[in-house]
Image: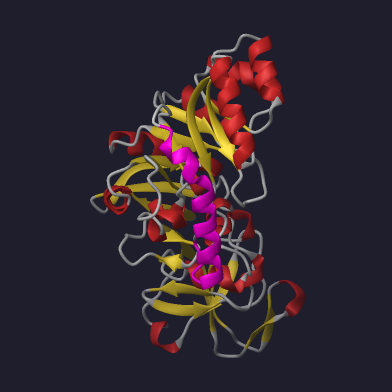
Amino acid sequence: MRTWAEIDLDNLEYNIKKIKKLSHNKNIMAIIKADAYGMGAVTIAKELSAMGVKIFGVSSLEEGIELRNSGIVDEILILAGTFNEELKEAEEKDLQVTLTDFSQIDYICKNKLSLKVHIKIDTGMGRVGFTVEEGKKILEICKNKKIDIIGVYSHLSVSDESDEESKDYTKKQLEKFKYFESLKEIKYIHILNSGGILKFSEIPQSNLVRAGIIMYGVYGEGIIEDLKRVFTLKSRILLLKELEEDIDISYGRVGKGFKGDMIATITVGYADGFRRELSNKGMIEIKGIPCKIVGKVCMDMLMVKIPQELRDKVKIGDEVIVMGEDIFEKSKIIGSSIYELFTGLSRRVNRVYLKNGEPHLVNSLIGKI
């Protein structure tokens, strides 16, 4: 393999148990949208189901159908709203949908659809959902029209931030949602996302939490101390050469190599999801030593300078760590987030699932290995 993501399923199971404890034993909805944040939605769903997670959140109808077609029989909620013309297929695939507009009620009734719905309340995200008062009204309308409301939820916009202003804003969102937490007849009441689980699980009385990126031991502010990191991106050394003269390296001549330098070419590039903004800035770890990227990251390769202490220890074919403990630092360099680095992994990056430290399953472009 040239480039692969190692996904430690033992650490994933540890994190699920820890999240359960952090959430005071509430049920967990595992958010596996965007191909489970790049980890592989079908495989992750199957593993989580075996761990006792029985409801999943996806972004779209297609993501839900992918899970159903792959044999996932647990509950699945489409979080990002559903167009009216998609509701019939959602019913056929037994997918729960999020109501975001009053017109959807008329459409459901007119077409005699039997759907399980969640009502989305906008408490301060400003994206989709009903106001608190609209939410109360739609609950009554759905009850009268015998629409099966299985959940009511909202989303926290800054729960992963540590400053006092953000904390106060989150508390205001939780206070707005408080009315809906008293609805005993609703199966699922949920507002806590990854940041909410970590910082605000003492406040609301919701009976379900939505765990997304924290399942992998990280979130907006980096590695989570009490959880285990699940993800490591690895690649290999394709070529080693000692420079015989000063040369420019990679596109645009922005990288500089000098006579006597040892340069390693690594088989990972921006087409794999390794961001070009890391050109001439980022580091690759080889045998525990950080090695600086030299020049621009190419589509399929990048180059690093081998420090003196590694010269006699490296060889062609050696594996390197492209992203691991330093993933948060890399996200800061590119001015983005861990979420974007995860979800940016391309199809050609093999997903290697580990159990007991050994490969358990490998998903690649050519199928399971």
Asked which quadrant contains residue 319, the reply is: bottom left
Predominant secondary structure, magenta span? helix
Q: Is residue 188 visible?
A: yes
Of residue 352 and residue 149, the one placed in the foreground of this image is 149
Query: Can you give x and y, in whole percent of width and height, for residue 347 in the image?
Result: 56, 45
Of residue 49 and residue 238, the one placed in the foreground of this image is 49
Query: Can you give x and y, in whole percent of width and height, for residue 337 in the image?
Result: 57, 63
Instruction: Give the colour scheme of this rendering.
Output: secondary structure
Q: Which portion, as a residue range, is magenta?
A: 160-183
Q: Residue at x 67, y 50 (%)?
A: 126
Q: Is residue 367 visible?
A: no
In this rendering, the answer to whether 357 lies above or below 67 is below
Of residue 150 and residue 314, the one placed in the foreground of this image is 150
The outermost residue toward the left is 356
Q: Residue at x 49, y 52 (%)?
A: 174
In this rendering, the answer to whether 213 lies above or below 65 is below
Of residue 122 and residue 172, the one placed in the foreground of this image is 172
Query: How many numbered circles does the render carry?
Result: 0
Query: Can you give x and y, in whole percent of width and height, for residue 336 in the image?
Result: 61, 65
In this rendering, the answer to whether 184 lies above or below 237 is above
Is 281 included in the stretch rendered in magenta? no
Q: Judge left or right: residue 37 versus residue 211.
A: right
Query: Can you give x and y, in whole percent of width and height, for residue 49 in the image?
Result: 33, 34
Asked which quadrant contains residue 369, the reply is: top left
Q: Residue at x 60, y 61 (%)?
A: 269
Is 167 included in the stretch rendered in magenta? yes
